[in-house]
Image (cartoon, rainbow, N blue to C red):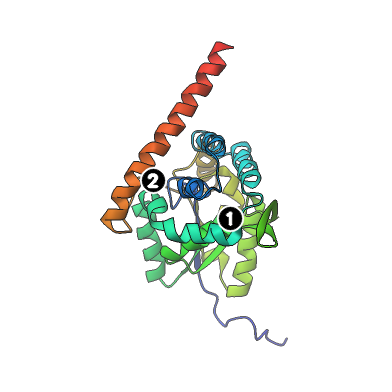
Amino acid sequence: MDEDPTQPDTLREAAFFDLDKTIIATSSATAFSRPFLAQGLLTRRSVIRTAYAQLLYLVGGGDEDQTERLRAELSRMVAGWDVSLVSSIVAETLHESIDPTVYAEAVALIAEHHAAGRDVVVVSASGAEVVEPIAAILGADHVIATRMTVVDGRYTGEIDFYAYGENKASAIRDVAQVEGYDLAASYAYSDSITDAPMLGAVGHAFAVNPDRALRRLAVERGWGTLSFVRPVPLFPRRARIATAGVVTVAVVAVVITWIAVRRRRQSR
């Protein structure tokens, strides 16, 4: 049998990291709400709607229903946005928006995998325009992310590829085929039961801060369990101080929204 010249002689290993609530402690898709609002892409009403969807995602364990609700809200929100403007805002505010949310344990683990000679691949259901810059500052080698439909330089609100559930696993297998990764010897990390296909695609799977369903599955399948708790200051102190006020305002807004919703339900 003739050898395939496109395949490497020796397969390499890789580490696949979910982004939201695994590398960072929030949703990357909503981390840029404040600069988007300042540039007129968002209205205050849409910020509140997105904050509520984000709250349900965080307290609901990121299950399929909560993730789909957040995806639908974000797709509706970005329809008509100028792609180049989104990219420029993300680039200009990346430090202040993301720095306070990055887990120190994730950064250390990424460094360990690189030191061991493994490629690092960030896998996220958030849009590529947001995920790729974050992955770059983390030193990731490749990115798998959702890709929105673009017509005449603007998002239509439709999705070309949704990096979610089984789609993540399929994309991982595709990348492995191209890059020559041995998935049986590779690693994957995620917090959510919706990423069970992704975790099941590799030989070494780890549940990070897992929701209850994923914790049970990890026990059943013998997957490792990790706890990430410490944010790491990746960027200059001045940027972190400026961000602290932003994070405080965002937290207060989410809490107020949650209280209002609870009171409204209790009054019925």
In the picture, which quadrant includes the C terminus? Answer: top right
Residue at left offset 54%, top offset 64%: 143
> Taking 201 as reference, is 44 above or below it?
above
Helix, strand or loop for disc 2:
loop
Q: Is residue 82 left or right of residue 113?
A: right
Q: Is residue 81 left or right of residue 260?
A: right
The picture places residue 252, in percent across and down from the top left corner, at 40, 32
Q: Position of residue 155 (x, y in %)?
A: 66, 55
Residue 227: image tag: 2
Q: Nearer the viewer, mark 1 or mark 2?
A: 1
| Residue positioned 60% across, 59% down in the render | 83
Q: Residue 142: where, in percent of width, then height? A: 53, 67
Q: CA distance from mark 1 to mark 2?
A: 26 Å
Residue 19: x, y in percent? 49, 53
Q: Which residue is mark 1?
A: 127
Secondary element under disc 1, as helix, strand or loop, is strand
Mark 1 and mark 2 in contact? Answer it, CB < 8 Å: no
Q: Amino acid at mark 2?
A: Ser
In the displayed image of the protein, which residue is found farthest to the top?
267
- Say whether residue 174 is visible: yes
